[in-house]
Image (tube, helix red, strand yellow):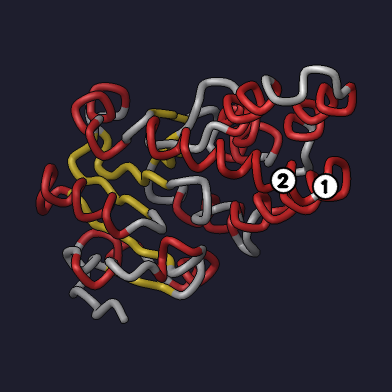
Amino acid sequence: MADDIVFLIDCDNTLMDNDRVQSDLREHMEKEFGAEARDRYWSIYTELFAQLGYADYLGALQRYRLDAMNDPKLLLMAGWLMNYRFADRLYPGALDVIKHLRQWGKVVIVSDGDVVFQPRKVEYSGLWDAVDGNVLIYIHKETMLEQIEVAYPARHYVMIDDKVRILAAMKKGWGDRLTTVFPRQGHYAFADDVAGYTTPDLAVDRIGDLLGYDLPAFTGVEKETVS
């Protein structure tokens, strides 16, 4: 049976400050391996991101290893990544917003990423338990609408994401069945192409601002201008 409403929430730069995570990783790599090694890793990471369409931190580390086979410290990098304190990088109010939304419907984290690092990030941040394990991780979630409907059927969906491109694509697929919510957080939220996409139904400055909104705002809200 379909729920009346299901809230779908992205993870990176929506619930979690992933820009800070990346900044910490850069700082750690420079401290342990030097600026040249740091830049080499991020070059590989960027190349992989362009190829795969999602962040593959461990895949980039595996490729980087080919250039540093004899450096024992490199073997500890995966451990640093996997044991990172992701809970410390949740945006203020992120868990409260999930609790706030759950009074009206099921909350599902829908994120892009790999099948090892991304689930661990969601779990170790506390987000997995906050949504009772309702987690979907894809490569391009905006192309997975049918699969989302099968997993979590609903009469109406709300998608909360920091990427206007993804919100616009999902709105095109679901139309009026979807309310799009745009928290202006992270570097994607201020990209040059933001104004070129369909204006989200609701825009807020930070995820915690959603605590001030009640159910009607998520089921039939007038569009706000994205600046």
Horizontal side of 171 relative to 61 (left or right) equals: left
Identify which amino acid the numbered label 1 is placed on: Gly
- The answer to which of 25 and 153 lies nearer the viewer is 25
Q: Quadrant of residue 86?
A: top right
Q: Which residue is pictured at 70% across the width and 25% down the height?
A: 67
3D distance between C-alphas at marks 2 and 1:
6 Å
Q: Quadrant of residue 119?
A: top right
Q: Residues within 10 Å of mark 1 (few under 14, many from 20)?
A: few
Horizontal side of 17 relative to 8 (left or right) equals: right
Relative height, residue 99 to residue 49 (above, below): below
Where is residue 135? Give x, y as percent.
47, 30
Horizontal side of 113 relative to 74 (left or right) equals: left
Q: Which residue is mark 2?
A: 38
Horizontal side of 114 relative to 72 (left or right) equals: left
Q: In terms of secondary structure, where does tag 1 sit?
A: loop
Q: Quadrant of residue 174?
A: top left
Where is residue 98? Give x, y as percent.
52, 51
Q: Residues within 10 Å of mark 2 (few under 14, many from 20)?
A: some
- The answer to which of 203 and 189 lies nearer the viewer is 189
Disc 2 to disc 1: CB gap under 8 Å: yes
Please identify the quadrant where the N terminus is shown: top left
Q: Which residue is mark 1?
A: 34
Relative height, residue 21 to residue 47 (above, below): below
Identify which amino acid the numbered label 2 is placed on: Arg
Q: Which residue is pictured at 74% across the width and 47% down the height?
A: 36
Where is residue 60? Give x, y as percent.
59, 30
Please identify the quadrant where the C terminus is shown: bottom left
Which mark, by number, is residue 74? none
Q: What count of labels does the image hold? A: 2
Q: In terms of secondary structure, where does tag 2 sit?
A: helix
Relative height, residue 97 to residue 9 (above, below): below
